[in-house]
Amino acid sequence: MNQHNTAPAASIPHAYWDTLPREKREKAARQALKRRDVDTLVELTMHNLLAYGRGGAHTSVHTMRAYSTGVRAYLAYALPLGWKRLTEHDTDLTIGYIRTLERQGVKPGTINARRSAARALYRALRWAGVLHADPFSDTPRAQDREDRWVKREAYSRADVDALLVLADPDETRFLLLGAHGALRMAELISLEWKDINFEKRTMTVIGKGRKTATVHLSSPLVTALEQVPAPERVGTVLPWQNPKTIRLVLRALCHRAGVQYTKRQVHGLRHAAATMLLDQCGDIYVVARHLRHSSVGTTETYAKLNNRRLTDALATWDDAADSAAD
């Protein structure tokens, strides 16, 4: 195989794509496919995502990283099967990719995330003029047959307390921002001290879709934040900027505390916030507001009903009916 045709000297930076006329864009994209130049194809996708994606220029680094990983995964599967197939409405290729991931035991949520990234690649190729259809539009999403109530477990109140006992000040802020503030991974990383309003006991969070929201702080969270001297409250609230590092921090804490990490991970802290708040106030609408959900249906997948509450409610059903009749 000709070495020149398998690896280019350098990829085309995504900011450069706007300077190319349509015919040169198409030529550059085709050459990248032919040479299996994955870096250039990723740059093309990232440019298109920033220009035409829902988040536009404000698309988060977390999203960009996830899409980049997904595009590379799809190209690793598709390019060895023939670069020309990516220029056609080849549903055998796209469905084959989904079924391959299923056979490998990849979870439906991850498969659908990979599908979204691959669709972004095809959108970019259409913008470049390489093809005019999206084969993934005729490729079904992976079906999640797991009960949504058990898909991701929440840390219990006892689990959170056990972790806090062993946590240092930085880890304490992290745990409480997740388990009380209900922040997502990207929100944990990007939260800055200027976003904290100690007087109002709130923080300003930029969430999914670049939506800005005001989140109220619990008393333990306020206390943990106030322990940082005012002159040091500069930049990001947490010292870690890499999601992998944050996962390692929580995994290590769980190991030391004897708390289950599997099927919970970092997002399990957000589930814990929902579950504990529902247990405390009994109002799922309050929980939905705290989690910044537009639909209570979404909140139901986070705020798992305490079985004890259900048992107690059913046990006193007749008593409640009798009281109403009186």
Image: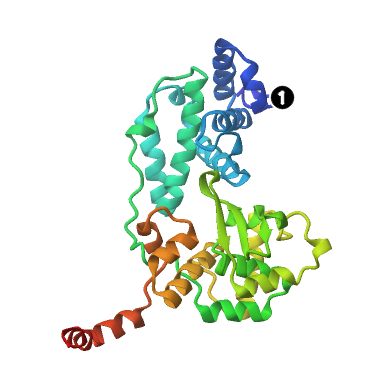
**Residue 12 visible somewhere in the drawing:** no
Amino acid found under the numbered disc labelled 1: Ala
Rendered residue at 51%/69% (across/down): 273
Rendered residue at 51%/26% (across/down): 124
Which residue ends up furthest to the left in the rendered image? Answer: 325
**Whole-percent x, y for residue 25 in the image:** 57, 16
**Whole-percent x, y for residue 206 in the image:** 58, 50
Residue 207 shown left or right of residue 149 in the figure: right
Residue 94 shown left or right of residue 247 in the figure: left
Q: Relative to 183, say whether 140 is above or below.
A: above
- Label 1: element kind: loop
Residue 136 shown left or right of residue 179 in the figure: left
Pointer 1: what residue? Answer: 9
Front residue of 73 and 45: 45
**Whole-percent x, y for residue 266 in the image:** 56, 63
Q: Relative to 311, say whether 108 is above or below.
A: above
Rendered residue at 39%/35% (across/down): 94
Front residue of 174 and 115: 174
**Whole-percent x, y for residue 161 in the image:** 59, 80
**Residue 215 visible somewhere in the drawing:** yes
Q: Quadrant of the N terminus?
A: top right
Q: Quadrant of residue 172?
A: bottom right
Rendered residue at 72%/57% (across/down): 193
